[in-house]
């Protein structure tokens, strides 16, 4: 066991400052005289983008397995699958000497246009947090670390290094922080990576509210915080706020600033020592557990990548066209993505993969198909010759599978999309083929939602997202029924871009104003009663599932209790399948403005025909709560809540009600718009009246036409500002009195009145 405190005491000031920044692009510094090793970190999260040895180019990476990106794996709704993927990646990390894998990325999909949505998990914070925690536990079970990112509210690429994500504390707490919170509390990632952007005007790399008050003091994070590459603004301020490791190297510039700040007294050395201790704890956790190195088994992990991909693909629509027959039908594959699938997004998560299997290659093991390219993969304009070849093939085919999607140039880290369309040449191709053939299936390769103007014309739509190097094998297995699709959308598919919640404010320039508040994704569309192309949680199967017998352990609880929800799921179809059962909670109290319902549980069950299984969920106070800014905590109001179980957010199969009683007292906060009618709902209301407006009452009672009851009746419905005008009370006196009143009666002394 290392005595880290002793090591720190033996380090020079310069060595300590140096340890808080990288040696180069991918490694930390060593202190050889004290036996402190250098360790390597690597981009992820869906594979190793690890630098080759002895290369000067930090982007020259080894060959590795490309697993499905988060846009796809999120659709698994499967914690066990995410843990398995994490375990596989953890083993790969140990094989190539990676101490920390940079991922997962759990920023919320505020807009479908965000350039990095392909590597983010979901529009829903509960789903993102649960899957991230499973992935982290998997990686770290192999004694390699993770760096959950980007903390926080990094929801656009436009001006990402300077733009401020500006939102209410409630919005931050309910939507943009919970995925990180769940991951920290359930998995304790070794590191957290702070974001480039500002959060309410303060850079993520120097924000004490997020890095210390919330992350460490509230959530109990025990690892170290590293910067995104180049995300440091003020190194000394960042160190004080809780940023431990700067990546990559600043060439000694910021190290010198730390040293100087300690010497001139502007930085207490305790901040530096604490950062060094956090870093060393994880460095030695990795270095002291190094097993004998095993070679990277790319072939074995490719098979795992294929199995994972099959669990993620979403069957969006099926009018009986799928599965395809293996014989007796003329089947055409059309579209450049059949020959050259898009398997991952662009930017820092791009994997140098050895093997990419296309659908056109994979289908040779199943049956013979005809092929036409149809369009050029990276172009927007139609090639007339390719279009006509495709149309001729479609005329004589029994079924046409069009492989479409977004080219690399349409979505990548570094920029946001400006629209939701796929290339015009692909839309034209699908329209033309639908005119010539009644049995058209579309397979999509994309990292985020797209508009589908032809959705009503085709017979089936298969959303493959960016499914990794085995995408072609997974897609063909599902097309021909060798695997049953079981993916569910982790994000809503709007009909058009202008329907999206932040259409008028995305992207921000100097400031991104989150005016939509907590109404992101399905929360927005349901509140607005707005139709979508495909709802959150949607995904079809080749079999059918029946939901029955919902039961609550109690239908009358307090906010200190938990409640268990059970139900029975039965496969009533004729083939084996998996169903992701989703639990939503609806607040019916009317106490606060809240979404219609929110995801608070999911379980995936595997069932043979006629087989049943019981699913069980446990709910606690947090699942019924919203973030109350006056209380600065989570609050579940007294009243009725509805528990819903469904196959998607729009397909609710079962529901049950319960009554919850709040045991927490809210502070009563008065302002110039508060009425004394509100005050009189409280025992202390009369006392408050005397404190603030005794003078007004006294003056009015001096008139001929007023008695005490008449005065009180007149004043009871008026806001404080209006009452002020009846007496000789200035605004300054009124606000001073309100402040005094809130201090006097604030906190637990005030109980929220019951509903009337």
Image (tube, grey):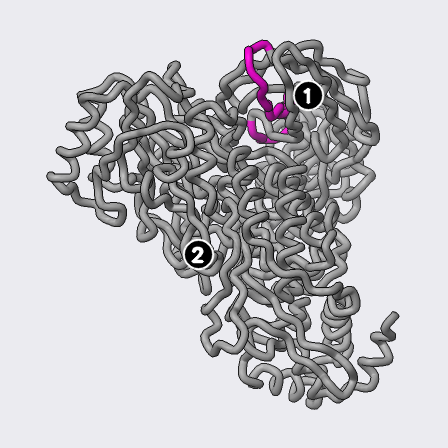
Magenta region includes residue 158? no
SS at mark 1? strand
Total number of numbered discs in the rendering: 2
| Image-quadrant location for residue 566 | top right
| Image-quadrant location for residue 192 | bottom right
**Is residue 182 shown above or below 441?**
below
Give how far across and how far down residue 360 sits, in percent.
Answer: 34, 37
Residue beneath the point at 60% across and 61% down: 193
Whether residue 493 is visible to the viewer of this picture, yes or no, is: yes
Q: Is residue 710 left or right of residue 540?
A: right
**Is residue 322 shown above or below 737?**
above
Q: Is residue 445 left or right of residue 127?
A: left
Give how far across and how far down residue 727 sits, in percent.
Answer: 63, 42
Structural crowding at the residue carrying mark 1, measured as other residues with C-alpha within 10 Å and reported as few (<14), some (14–19) or many (≥20): many
Give how far across and how far down residue 414 sits, in percent.
Answer: 40, 59
| Image-quadrant location for residue 225 | bottom right
Which residues lie in the magenta part?
572-595
Give how far across and how far down residue 695 sits, in percent.
Answer: 71, 41
Residue beneath the point at 41% across and 29% down: 366
Task: Please tell me the numbered disc located at residue 641.
Answer: 1
């Amino acid at each position: 066991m290392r005595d880290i405190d002793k090591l720190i005491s033996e380090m020079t000031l310069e060595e300590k400052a140096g340890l808080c920044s990288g040696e180069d692009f991918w490694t930390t510094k060593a202190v050889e005289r004290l036996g402190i090793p250098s360790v390597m970190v690597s981009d992820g999260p869906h594979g190793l983008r690890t630098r080759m040895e002895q290369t000067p180019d930090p982007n020259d990476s080894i060959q590795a397995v490309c697993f499905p990106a988060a846009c796809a794996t999120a659709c698994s709704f499967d914690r066990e699958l995410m843990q398995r993927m994490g375990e596989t990646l953890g083993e790969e990390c140990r094989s190539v000497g990676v101490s920390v894998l940079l991922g997962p990325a759990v920023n919320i999909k505020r807009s479908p246009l965000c350039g990095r949505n392909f590597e983010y998990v979901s529009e829903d914070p509960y789903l993102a947090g649960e899957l991230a925690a499973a992935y982290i536990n998997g990686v770290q079970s192999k004694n390699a670390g993770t760096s959950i990112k980007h903390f926080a509210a990094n929801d656009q690429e436009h001006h990402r290094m300077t733009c401020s994500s500006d939102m209410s504390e409630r919005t931050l707490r309910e939507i943009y922080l919970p995925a990180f919170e769940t991951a920290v509390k359930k998995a304790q990632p070794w590191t957290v990576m702070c974001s480039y952007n500002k959060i309410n005007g303060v850079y993520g790399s120097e924000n004490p509210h997020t890095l210390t008050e919330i992350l460490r003091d509230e959530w109990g994070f025990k690892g170290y915080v590293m910067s995104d590459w180049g995300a440091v603004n003020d190194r000394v301020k960042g160190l004080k706020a809780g940023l431990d490791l700067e990546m990559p190297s600043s060439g000694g510039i910021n190290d010198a600033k730390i040293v100087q700040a300690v010497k001139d007294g502007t930085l207490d050395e305790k901040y530096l020592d604490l950062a060094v201790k956090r870093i060393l704890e994880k460095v030695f956790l990795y270095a002291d557990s190094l097993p004998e190195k095993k070679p990277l088994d790319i072939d074995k992990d490719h098979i795992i990548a294929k199995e994972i991909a099959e669990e993620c693909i979403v069957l969006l629509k099926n009018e009986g066209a799928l599965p395809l027959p293996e014989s007796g039908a003329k089947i055409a594959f059309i579209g450049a993505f059949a020959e050259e699938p898009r398997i991952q997004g662009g930017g820092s998560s791009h994997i140098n993969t050895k093997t990419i299997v296309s659908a056109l290659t994979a289908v040779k093991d199943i049956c013979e198909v005809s092929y036409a390219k149809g369009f050029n993969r990276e172009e927007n304009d139609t090639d007339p010759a390719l279009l006509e070849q495709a149309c001729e093939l479609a005329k004589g085919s029994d079924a046409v599978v069009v492989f479409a999607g977004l080219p690399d140039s349409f979505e990548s880290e570094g920029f946001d999309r400006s629209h939701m369309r796929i290339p015009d040449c692909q839309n034209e191709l699908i329209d033309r083929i639908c005119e010539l053939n009644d049995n058209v299936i579309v397979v999509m390769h994309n990292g985020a939602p797209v508009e589908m103007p032809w959705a009503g014309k085709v017979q089936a739509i298969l959303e493959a997202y960016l499914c990794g190097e085995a995408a072609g094998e997974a897609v063909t297995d599902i097309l021909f029924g060798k695997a049953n699709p079981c993916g569910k959308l982790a994000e809503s598919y709007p009909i058009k871009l202008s329907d999206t919640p932040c259409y008028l404010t995305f992207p921000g320039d100097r400031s991104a104003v989150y005016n939509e508040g907590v109404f992101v994704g399905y929360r927005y569309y349901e509140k607005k009663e707005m139709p979508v192309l495909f709802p959150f949680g949607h995904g079809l199967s080749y079999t059918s599932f029946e939901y029955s017998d919902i039961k609550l352990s109690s239908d009358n609880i307090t906010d200190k209790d938990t409640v268990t929800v059970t139900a029975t799921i039965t496969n009533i179809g004729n083939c084996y399948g998996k169903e992701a059962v989703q639990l939503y909670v609806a607040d019916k109290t009317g106490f606060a403005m809240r979404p219609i319902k929110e995801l608070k549980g999911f379980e995936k069950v595997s069932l043979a025909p006629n087989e049943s299984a019981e699913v069980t969920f446990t709910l606690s106070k947090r699942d019924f709560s919203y973030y109350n800014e006056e209380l600065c905590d989570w609050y579940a109001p007294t009243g009725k809540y509805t528990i819903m179980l469904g196959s998607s957010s729009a397909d609710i199969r079962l529901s049950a009600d319960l009554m919850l009683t709040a045991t927490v007292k809210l502070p009563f906060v008065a302002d110039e718009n508060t009425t004394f009618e509100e005050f009189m709902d409280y025992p202390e209301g009369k006392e408050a009246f005397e404190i603030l407006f005794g003078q007004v009452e006294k003056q009015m009672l001096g008139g001929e036409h007023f008695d005490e009851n008449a005065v009180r009746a007149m004043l009871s419905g008026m806001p404080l500002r209006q009452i002020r005008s009846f007496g000789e009370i200035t605004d300054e006196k009124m606000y001073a009195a309100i402040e005094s009143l809130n201090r006097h009666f604030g906190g637990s002394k005030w109980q929220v009145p019951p509903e009337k």
